[in-house]
Image (spheres, rainbow, N blue to C red):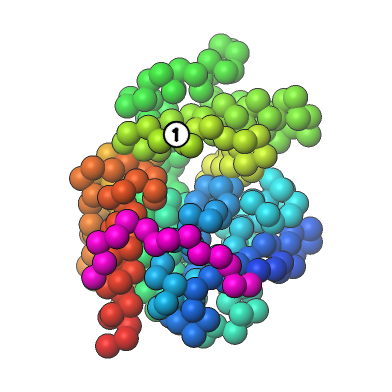
Amino acid sequence: MSDRVIFPRVDARRSGYLTVDEPHRLYWEQVGNPEGIPVVFLHGGPGSGISEAHRRFFDPEHFNVLLFDQRGTGRSTPLAELTGNTTQDLVADIERFREMLGVERWIVFGGSWGSTLALAYGEAHPERCLGFILRGIFLGSGAELDWFMHGMGKFFPEAARRFEHFLPESERGDLLHAYHRRLISPDPAVHLPAAVAWAGYEGACSTLLPLPAVGQEDPARALSLARLEAHYFVNRVFLEPDQLLNRLDRIAHLPATIIQGRYDVICPVETAAALASAWPGAILEVVTDAGHSAMEPGIAKGLVRAMDRLRLFIQT
C-alpha cells in the first residue's frame, strides 16, 4: 500500500464535451488506464470545477479515471449558468456520462459538495456503483448551511469580518440572500466583487495552515463557485430534509471510506461521524493534522491509500 502523497502529473488520454439539457455542455476527461477499474471524480463547490491536480489521486496503471466539470463550472458551458442547474440535474448528468462512456459500474469518488453528489447519485443508481471514497462530508442540512454562513467565523473571525463587511450594515442580518441578490445580477460590476468576496471567505477557511493558492481566486472561477453555491444554498441544495441519510440503506451494502480532516471548519467532523454511524460498513478515517482541502498532505495521503485498499478489495 502506497505512502506517497499524490501521483506525478499525468495528461488526459481523451477529452471532449457531452451535450445535456440546453444550454449545457459538459467538459470531460479520461485519465489513466482505459482497461483499469473505472472511477468517476465528482468535484466540490458546487461550482469549483476539475483541475489537473484532481487526476493525481489515482494510480494511472490501475484506474480508468473519468472526470467532468459540472453544469456551469470550469470548461463546461455556459459558465455560472443557473438554468437547469439542480442536484437532480447533476445526478442525471453523471448517469449520462456513464452511459456515454459505456461503463457498467464504477467507483464514486467525491469530496465536500462532491460527497453530497456522490451519495445522491449512489442512492439513485446503486446498481452502477462499486464503492465510494468520500471526503469532507456535506449532507446539505440547514444546520450545515447556517454553519457555512455564520459558524466558520468562530474559527476565522478575520475572514468572516471581511465577508460580512463587504455588505452594507443594513443587509448583514441575512448574508445568504444579500449575496445571492448580487451574485445573480447580470451586471459584472455587481456580481464579480461579490463573487471574489465569497470565494475569498471560503478559501481562507479551507485549510488548517494557509496554502498560497487558496483564496486567490480568479474572477471567472470565483463567479462559478459563489453564484452556484448561493443558488444551491437558497434552494436547500434541492434535497428533502435528511434525504441522504434516510435513503442510505440503498447503498449500505457497498464498501465506503470517509476521509475527514479533524479541523475541517467548512464541513465539520461531526457530519462525517453522523454518516459513518448510519453506515456501519463504512470506514471513517479522521486526519489529525488537516482541515478541509483535499490537497492538504494528510488528506491527500489518506485518499490515495483508500483507493489502494478499494482496488485490492475489488480485485479479490
Residue 285 visible from this viewpoint? yes
Q: Position of residue 312 (x, y in %)?
A: 28, 80
**Residue 100 shown left or right of residue 206 in the figure:** right
Q: Which residues are magenta?
A: 1-14
Q: Left or right of 65: which side holds 168?
A: right
Residue at 49%, 19% (x, y): give it: 162
- Quadrant hosting residue 153: top left
- Does residue 92 appear in the picture of this structure? no
Q: Is residue 229 above or below residue 17?
A: above
Indicate the quadrant containing the C terminus: top left, top right, bottom left or bottom right.
bottom left
Residue located 60% across and 13% down the image: 168
Q: Residue furthest top?
A: 169
In the image, residue 63 sits, relative to residue 197, either above or below, namely: below
Q: Position of residue 70 (x, y in %)?
A: 61, 57
Asked whether 133 or 217 is in front, the reply is: 217
In this view, the residue in front, 197 or 56, is 56
Q: Give the residue pinned by disc 1.
A: 212
Residue 181: in magenta span: no
Q: Amino acid at mark 1?
A: Pro
Q: Position of residue 55 (x, y in %)?
A: 48, 62
* Residue 134 position within the rendered picture, expressed as x and y whole percent measured from the top left: 37, 60
Q: Main secondary structure of the magenta part?
A: loop
Magenta-colored stretch includes residue 11 = yes
Name, please, the residue furthest toward the front: 8
Frontmost residue, 115 versus 102: 102
